[in-house]
Image (cartoon, rainbow, N blue to C red):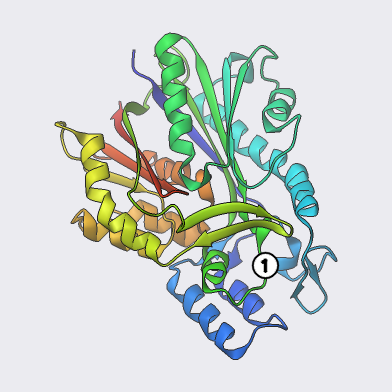
């Protein structure tokens, strides 16, 4: 029995926020020098993003006195304050995505046997897993796991763990839930790396229902095949996610796309082995330049990354949730070509990948 993704649910907070609004917001900060304004303009315009979503009302022009004050000025709340916002806002978003996945799968919450939660933008306990069981009505006996602080790549290891569970328990129904509130950690900065981070990251949640039991849920979906993981030879200092006094701090150097472009062919070779080369691609859009390097490094056709580019355009980079948004978009296509390669990149620099096949 092969594990399959039966369905993927997604959720985003609030109304879509135009990239132009966000560019003007950051360029309009009182401490933004002329050079900083130019860097902001260049980074935001090059991001290939049209809209993003955020839980912060201040980015929509509604000053809250915590993150923003009148005049669209960014404040510097403590990490504790930011994490309290995460505790308050992450659960409703995760619940919406999870319920969407269950509804699409045509499964009841009571049928879920395992829950895997994923996040790198906040912490609390009893945590997201506890609240999902309580508020969704999952069985109190559902086995819980949490993958925390693994960055943008974490949803693929979560799917891998779900597949391992179904290997040993063929009738298991695993609910994977990723929620990321990246905008909680924004800051005004003249640092080019922080400016790039501000130009791409956004908030969102996604959930997948995974089972190997063909009698559970609706038919179809994506069969989970081979997984692969790799640490690149360099990049440990180029993509870093740490906790500071005023929020989590992202280091995202200009070397990241180059490292990915150089390493991607070997990573895909490890995933594919002797099997048929992928025809469909789901690549985490760490940014437009990352997708450009992957396309060039693998010698892909311009349309090969259409799903990845369209999710980046419509939502930005929602960290670990993003790859599930892309897989959902592929699942919605009338006849996605098999096999499908899913690739995501995390701090380290790490590459996580999976090979999937559409199920009729």
Residue 218 visible, this angle: no
- Residue 60 in the image, given as x and y percentages of width and height: 71, 67
- Residue 44 in the image, given as x and y percentages of width and height: 51, 74
Q: Is residue 302 above or below residue 109?
A: below
Q: Few, some or many C-alpha atoms within 10 Å of disc 1 (few <14, some 14-19, many ≥20)?
A: many
Residue located farthest toward the right when viewing the structure as drawn:
65
The C terminus appears in which quarter of the rendering? top left
The N terminus appears in which quarter of the rendering? top left
Q: Please tell me which residue lies in front, 25 or 137.
A: 25
Is 277 left or right of 173, judged from the image as shown?
left
Asked which secondary structure carries label 1, the reply is loop
Q: Please tell me which residue lies in front, 291 or 213.
A: 291
Q: Please tell me which residue lies in front, 298 or 316.
A: 298
Q: Is residue 277 above or below residue 79?
A: above
User: Residue, x 61% and y 72% (percent of image)?
Assistant: 22
User: Residue, x 33% and y 58% (percent of image)?
Assistant: 259
Q: Quadrant of residue 156?
A: top left
Question: What residue is shown with label 1?
Answer: 187
- Residue 175 in the image, given as x and y percentages of width and height: 55, 25
Is 131 left or right of 50, judged from the image as shown?
right
Q: Quadrant of residue 275?
A: top left
User: Residue, x 63% and y 74% (percent of image)?
Assistant: 189
Residue 159 visible, this angle: yes
Q: Is residue 58 above or below residue 354?
A: below
User: Residue, x 69% and y 33% (percent of image)?
Assistant: 128
Tell how many labels. 1
Q: Quadrant of residue 191?
A: bottom right
Q: Please tell me which residue lies in front, 69 or 5.
A: 69
Is 154 left or right of 226, judged from the image as shown?
right
């Amino acid at each position: 029995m092969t594990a399959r993704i039966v369905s993927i649910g997604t959720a985003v907070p609030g109304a879509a926020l135009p990239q132009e609004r966000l560019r003007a917001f950051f360029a309009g900060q009182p401490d933004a020098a002329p050079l900083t304004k130019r860097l902001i303009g260049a980074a935001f315009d090059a991001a290939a993003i049209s809209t993003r979503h955020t839980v912060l009302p201040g980015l929509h022009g509604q000053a809250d006195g915590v993150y923003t004050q009148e005049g669209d000025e960014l404040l510097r709340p403590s990490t504790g304050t930011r994490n309290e916002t995460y505790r308050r806002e992450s659960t409703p978003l995760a619940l919406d995505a999870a319920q969407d996945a269950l509804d699409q799968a045509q499964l009841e919450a009571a049928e879920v046997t395992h829950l895997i939660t994923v996040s790198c933008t906040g912490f609390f306990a009893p945590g997201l897993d506890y609240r999902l069981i309580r508020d969704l009505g999952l069985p109190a006996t559902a086995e819980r796991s949490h993958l925390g602080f693994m960055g943008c790549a974490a949803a693929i290891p979560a799917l891998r763990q779900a597949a391992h569970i179904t290997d040993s328990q063929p009738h298991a129904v695993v609910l994977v839930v990723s929620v990321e509130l990246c905008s909680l950690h924004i800051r005004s900065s003249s640092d080019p790396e922080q400016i790039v981070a501000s130009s791409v990251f956004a908030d969102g949640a996604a959930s997948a229902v995974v089972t190997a039991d063909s009698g559970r849920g609706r038919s179809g979906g994506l069969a989970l095949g081979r997984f692969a993981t790799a640490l690149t030879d360099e990049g440990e200092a180029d993509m870093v996610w740490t906790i500071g006094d005023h929020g989590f701090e992202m280091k995202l150097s200009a070397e990241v796309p180059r490292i990915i472009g150089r390493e991607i062919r070997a990573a895909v070779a490890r995933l594919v082995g002797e099997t048929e080369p992928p025809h469909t691609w789901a690549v985490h859009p760490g940014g437009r330049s990352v997708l450009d390097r992957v396309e060039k490094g693998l010698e892909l056709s311009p349309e090969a990354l259409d799903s990845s580019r369209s999710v980046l355009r419509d939502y930005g980079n929602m960290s670990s949730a993003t790859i599930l948004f892309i897989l959902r978009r592929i699942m919605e296509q009338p006849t996605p070509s098999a096999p499908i390669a899913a690739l995501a990149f995390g701090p380290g620099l790490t590459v996580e990948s999976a090979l999937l096949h559409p199920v009729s």
